[in-house]
């Protein structure tokens, strides 16, 4: 399962906006996973420029087409890899 994409989908569903503070533990609970994989997904989203981390604080920078939404036809691993490449 592509956790980074799932996090973006959840944030879109909940109407998150740039500048919002994110809770890793709340994301983990909402997605039914532990914080360890969430930390990895947050790190990936940070490399993509979607979130910024300062210590334990995570802030949403953008929630645009950085990665395909879960229901997007261009989703999956290939779509995420393309989004990562575009972010570099």
Image: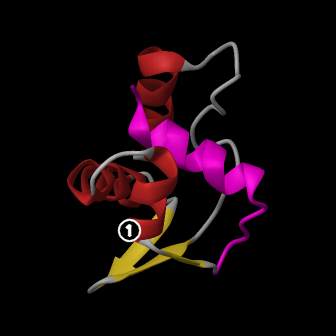
In the rendering, at what x and y percent does residue 59 appear?
51, 77
Residue shown at 36% from the left, 77% from the top: 53
* Residue 85 quadrant: top left
SS type, badge 1: helix
- When the figure is inspected, residue 64 is found, relative to residue 19, above or below; the finding is above
Residue numbers of the magenta segment: 1-19
**Does the magenta segment cover residue 3?**
yes
* Residue 17 quadrant: bottom right
Q: Is residue 31 left or right of residue 10?
A: left
* Residue 35 quadrant: bottom left
- When the figure is inspected, residue 78 is found, relative to residue 65, above or below; the finding is above
Q: Quadrant of the N terminus?
A: top left
Residue shown at 41% from the left, 45% from the top: 32
- When the figure is inspected, residue 37 is found, relative to residue 86, above or below; the finding is below
6 or 45, nearer to the observer: 6
Residue shown at 26% from the left, 86% from the top: 55
Indicate the colouring scheme. secondary structure
For label 1, the crowd category at 10 Å Cα-Cα, with few meaning under 14, some 14 to 19 and many 20 or more, is: some
- When the figure is inspected, residue 9 is found, relative to residue 61, above or below; the finding is above
87 or 5, nearer to the observer: 5
Q: How many marks do you count on the picture?
A: 1
Give the residue at mark 1: 25
């Amino acid at each position: 399962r592509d956790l980074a994409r799932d996090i973006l989908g959840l944030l879109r569903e909940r109407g998150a906006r740039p500048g919002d503070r994110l809770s890793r533990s709340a994301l983990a609970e909402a997605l039914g996973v532990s914080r360890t994989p969430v930390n990895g997904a947050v790190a990936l989203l940070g490399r993509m420029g979607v979130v910024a981390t300062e210590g334990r604080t995570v802030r949403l920078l953008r929630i645009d087409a950085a990665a395909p939404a879960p229901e997007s036809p261009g989703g999956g691993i290939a779509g995420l890899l393309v989004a990562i490449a575009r972010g570099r």
